[in-house]
Each structure stands twice: as structure tokens, then as C-alpha cells.
Amino acid sequence: MSRYEHEFVTMFAGLEKQLENIDNPRHRAILKNYRRHGLLEVSGRYQELLAPDMTVEHPQYRLHEGGQSIVLDGMAEVTAFYESLVAANALVMWVADQDIAVNDNGFSGEVVFNAFVPAPMLGESAFGNVQAGDDPSEIYLLRRTLAFVWPYDERCRLIGEHVYEDAASREITRPDPADVITAERAAELLAPEIDKVLP
């Protein structure tokens, strides 16, 4: 495995350990939904995470990053958002150091969030600034801390994502090209994790 692949594949190991100590069926269902959602998302399989058994018919995402706020209201806007990430080659991301609190309404927490981001996206306010002379085809590693609240409905389906960035935590580095995880490799690595049956 390359430098980041082990961390990528085991991104939810801490959450799986947390699940071992949770007996409440609703809380377990919410966290299992979150885990599956995350793995499907970064595998490019967003149609599956938006299916009626996982997400409500009218989700709302509220994303606050880089001094910019984006509200995605409804399935069409959320789907278009995922399509734009796929088109931009910006879906390979993973969480680390998760601190999750779950209750009947959903969960909240704070995570260290990593993402491989193509240089053109770094020019947008939501991601930062490209340095003069940077190769627009180059991939950067964006690392920052995010706080989030994800509400769930009575059927333990995701209602939406509310995400807030700690701008002071933002770090942008240039990884060795050999260490960059491609979208195709991400899907290959995570397929067994998506299908893993949790206790």
C-alpha cells in the first residue's frame, strides 16, 4: 500500500470500535448509515448513498468552508454537487481522529479531514489559493479540522449534512504523485469495506 492507503482504508476503524460499545439500536443504525454513506461517497457511488433507504427524499446540506457558505436544498442540488465533485476528480477524501457523539436526533462531532484536491479547485474560496506557477493538473493534499452535525429522520435516514471548517487548521501540501489515491483505486480499496457486515 502507498503512504496514505492504509489510513484511507481504515478511516472508520475508530467508529467501528465505538459501535462495539453501543447497544441502542437507533444509535447503531445512525452510525452504520454514516459509515456506509462515507465509504460510498468516496468510492464515487453517490447514487447508492442517496437511495431512499439511506437518505430522505429532500435532503439539505449546509457547507461552510474557506469563508464560503453553500446550501444545497433538495435531491437535485445534492446530486449535482456530487456530480461536480466526480467531474472535478475531487472525491478522494478520508477522515481521521474522529470524535463522534450520537443521540436520537443524529450525531455530531469533530474530525481531521483529508482530501486529494486538483489545483484548479484550490483557486476557489472554499479551498484556498494556488501559488503562482503551480501546475493546474497537479493534485494537492488538503487537510483541516471540520465540525459537523448530521440529523436523521425517524427511519434512521440522513436528513442532511451541516459542516463547519476550522480555517486555522487548514494545511495544503504537495504529495508525492506516487502516493496520490486515484478515484479508481479508492473504489477498489473500499469495496470490501462497504460490504463488510458489522456486528
Image: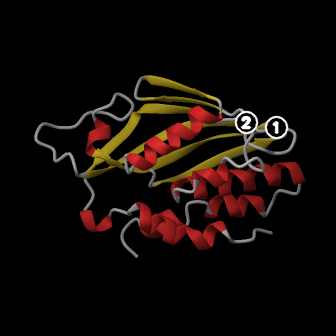
- The residue positioned 50% from the left and 71% from the top of the image is 188
In this picture the colour scheme is secondary structure
- The residue positioned 40% from the left and 29% from the top of the image is 66
Q: Is residue 141 above or below residue 21?
A: above
Of the 4 image quadrants, the one containing the C terminus is: bottom right
Residue located farthest toward the front when viewing the structure as drawn: 76
Determine the CA span between mark 1 and mark 2.
Answer: 6 Å
Image mark count: 2
Residue 102: image x %, image y %?
Answer: 76, 44
Of the 4 image quadrants, the one containing the N terminus is: bottom left
Q: Residues within 10 Å of mark 2 (few under 14, many from 20)?
A: some
Residue 70: image x %, image y %?
Answer: 51, 26
Residue beneath label 2, please?
Answer: 159
Q: Is residue 187 above or below residue 64?
A: below
115 vs 47, nearest the viewer:
47
Residue located farthest toward the left when viewing the structure as drawn: 133
Q: Is residue 110 above or below residue 184?
A: above
Q: Are marks 1 and 2 in contact (CB under 8 Å)?
A: yes
Residue 56: image x %, image y %?
Answer: 75, 39
The secondary element bearing badge 2 is classed as: loop
Q: Is residue 44 above or below residue 66?
A: below
Residue type of the residue flagged with mark 2: Ile
- The residue positioned 39% from the left and 31% from the top of the image is 126
The secondary element bearing badge 1 is classed as: loop
- The residue positioned 85% from the left and 39% from the top of the image is 104
Answer whether residue 187 is visible to the viewer in this image. yes
Question: Which label belongs to residue 153?
Answer: 1
User: Could you say which quadrant of the image residue 39 lies in?
Assistant: bottom right
Residue 177 appears left or right of 167: left
Which of the marked residues, 1 or 2, is nearer the chain's N terminus?
Answer: 1
Residue type of the residue flagged with mark 1: Asp
User: Could you say which quadrant of the image residue 179 lies in?
Assistant: bottom left
